[in-house]
């Protein structure tokens, strides 16, 4: 019985391997098998990073690198701005944020997933800031569990601002 199944399997694999490689063409009224060559060196497909989905942890970790490469945003006194960061408080992780004296947090909101039945799914934390003092200001956050001791490996986010009159 096992030999029979093995034989059938080999035949099916062989047939699947040959499918698409041989076609039938009619030349002068006679059917002839034509071998269709497969490309030997197909061109590589371009990678589109926007098609790649990352976990919350991967997206949050990528923020550290992005933070170090951003240019400070210019604001005027009284001008609001928003900062949105991925967060999954169901795992115990949340952003512990601080602002310098020239910024005030005027709104602090967590937006969960659209599908409320996704238990344990993360969302986005949105802070609305208002510039109140001239000069170099910053918003900074540490993504960690509040009951665990702070560590140098904690994910950090910093957004710099230059507040003008």
Image (cartoon, grey):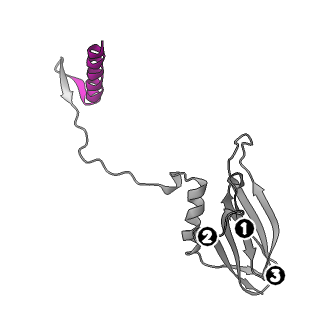
Q: Badge 3, how many Cα within 10 Å: few under 14, some, many 20+?
A: many
Which secondary structure lies at badge 1? strand
The relative height of residue 155 versus residue 40 in the rendered view (above or below) is below
Q: Badge 1, how many Cα within 10 Å: few under 14, some, many 20+?
A: few
Q: Which residues are magenta?
A: 1-25
- State the residue at coordinates (30%, 21%): 9
- State the residue at coordinates (72%, 46%): 114
Indicate left or right for 78 with 154 as reference. right
Q: Nearer the viewer, mark 2 or mark 3?
A: 2
Query: Which residue is identified by label 1?
Result: 96
Which secondary structure lies at badge 2? loop
Query: Which residue is identified by label 3?
Result: 132
Identify the mark nearer the N-term, 1 or 2.
1
Q: Badge 2, how many Cα within 10 Å: few under 14, some, many 20+?
A: few
Q: Quadrant of the N terminus?
A: top left
Going by the picture, which residue comes out furthest to the top? 1
Identify the mark nearer the N-term, 2 or 3.
3
């Amino acid at each position: 019985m096992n030999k029979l199944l093995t034989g059938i399997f080999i035949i099916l694999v062989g047939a699947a391997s040959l499918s698409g490689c041989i076609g039938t063409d009619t030349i002068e009224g006679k059917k002839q098998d034509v071998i269709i060559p497969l490309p030997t060196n197909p061109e590589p497909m371009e990678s589109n990073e926007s098609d790649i989905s990352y976990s919350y942890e991967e997206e949050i970790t990528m923020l550290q690198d992005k933070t170090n490469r951003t240019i400070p945003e210019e604001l005027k006194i009284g001008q609001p701005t928003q900062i949105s960061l991925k967060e999954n408080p169901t795992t115990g992780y949340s952003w512990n944020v601080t602002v310098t004296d020239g910024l005030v947090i005027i709104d602090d909101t967590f937006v969960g997933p659209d599908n409320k039945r996704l238990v344990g799914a993360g969302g986005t934390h949105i802070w609305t800031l208002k510039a109140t003092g001239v000069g170099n200001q910053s918003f900074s956050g540490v993504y960690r569990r509040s009951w665990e001791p702070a560590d140098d490996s904690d994910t950090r986010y910093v957004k710099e601002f230059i507040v003008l009159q």
